Image: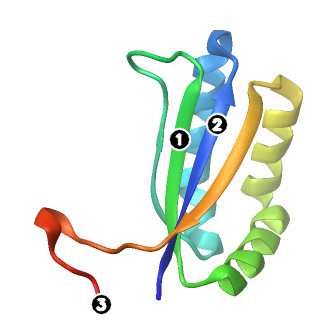
Amino acid sequence: MTITCFIQYDIDPYQKEAFEEYARNWNEAIPRCGADLIGYYAPHEGSATLAYAAYNIESLAAYEAYRARLKADPVGRANYEFAREKRFIRREDRTFLHLVTGKNGGLIR
């Protein structure tokens, strides 16, 4: 069963552009390291501090292996360092969910 990792970020509202660069940098590394990237979402209207990301992965065990590959990946390492240097992420929370219904309410089995 595939699970989806949703990440909620609390970002510095004065560094939204840095977060957007960070998000774009993951387009290459996340798929290469084994996850199916759904996307990153930056603030547009409403809250200036909430941002999100989502990707699919096979299981929590696959997630652990994926995270190890991401930390060893050159683009991944550089992006983690970019976030540490710029300090635009104030908080990051992950939640793992599984899909119950599809489009238009279709059941997933």
- The residue under label 1 is which amino acid type? Tyr
Q: Residue furthest left?
A: 104
Answer with left or right where residue 38 lies relative to residue 93.
left
Counting residues from the start of the chain, the first of labels 1 and 3 encountered is: 1
**Of circles 1 and 3, which is in front?**
3
Left or right of 79? Residue 104 is left
- Near mark 1 (Cα within 10 A), the count class, few <14, some 14-19 or many ≥20, is some
Where on the picture, by quarter, is residue 57? bottom right
Q: Give the alpha-carbon distance from disc 2 to disc 1, as whole Å.
A: 6 Å
What is the number of the mark on residue 30?
A: none
Which residue is rendered at x = 47% and y = 89% of the image? Answer: 1
Which disc, if any, is residue 109?
Answer: 3
Residue type at the position of mark 3: Arg
Quadrant location of the C terminus in the rendered image: bottom left
> Circle 1 sits on which residue?
52
Badge 3: residue crowd in 10 Å (few <14, some 14–19, many ≥20): few
Residue 32 vertical placement versus 60 (above, below)? above
**Tags 2 and 1 touching, CB below 8 Å:** yes
Question: Circle 1 sits in a helix, a strand or a loop, which is it?
Answer: strand
